[in-house]
Amino acid sequence: MKLEVANKKNPDTYWVATVITTCGQLLLLRYCGYGEDRRADFWCDVVIADLHPVGWCTQNNKTLMPPDGEHGLAQLLGITHNACRENLVEIQ
């Protein structure tokens, strides 16, 4: 399952994340573009987290921007908006 999630360091922007596993109301998420790299996985609480279905940013004029990891991991991996294009749904 994919969601649009607020970036931790820039909460005015969002990026697509995959739900890896759940534990009660907690979700383990991995940002799109990180492949099988688990170093950037993070837990969030569905009650307080800024989570939305894919397409929400487009409908609400919000910015989709790859997260910038602690060591610039997004740039190192070459993550771009096109990295998840095949996973995004076109909203009509």
Image: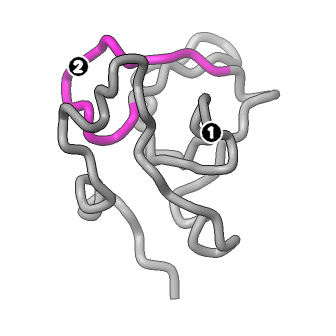
Residue 37: give its label. 2
Query: Does residue 34 belong to the magenta stretch?
Result: yes
Residue drawn at x 73%, y 31% is: 49
Residue situated in front as seen by the camera: 3 or 78: 78
Query: Which residue ends up furthest to the right in the rendered image?
Result: 48
In this picture, residue 85 sits left or right of residue 56: left
Residue 30: give its label. none
Residue drawn at x 68%, y 40% is: 11
In this picture, residue 9 sits left or right of residue 49: left
Query: Which residue ends up furthest to the bottom in the rendered image?
Result: 92
Q: Earlier in the sequence, mark 1 or mark 2?
A: 1
Judging from the image, what secondary structure is the residue with disc 2 in?
loop
Picture colour scheme: one colour
Q: Quadrant of the N terminus?
A: top left
Separation (CA) of disc 1 from disc 2: 22 Å
Q: Which residues are magenta?
A: 31-44
Residue 73 drawn above or below residue 15: above
Query: Does residue 84 belong to the magenta stretch?
Result: no
Residue drawn at x 42%, y 18% is: 70
Residue 89 visible: yes
Total labels drawn? 2
The residue labelled by disc 1 is 10
**Mark 2 belongs to which amino acid?**
Asp
Residue 50: horizontal and vertical position, in percent? 72, 39
Asked whether the beta carbons under mark 1 and mark 2 sit within 8 Å of each other, the answer is no
**Mark 1 belongs to which amino acid?**
Asn
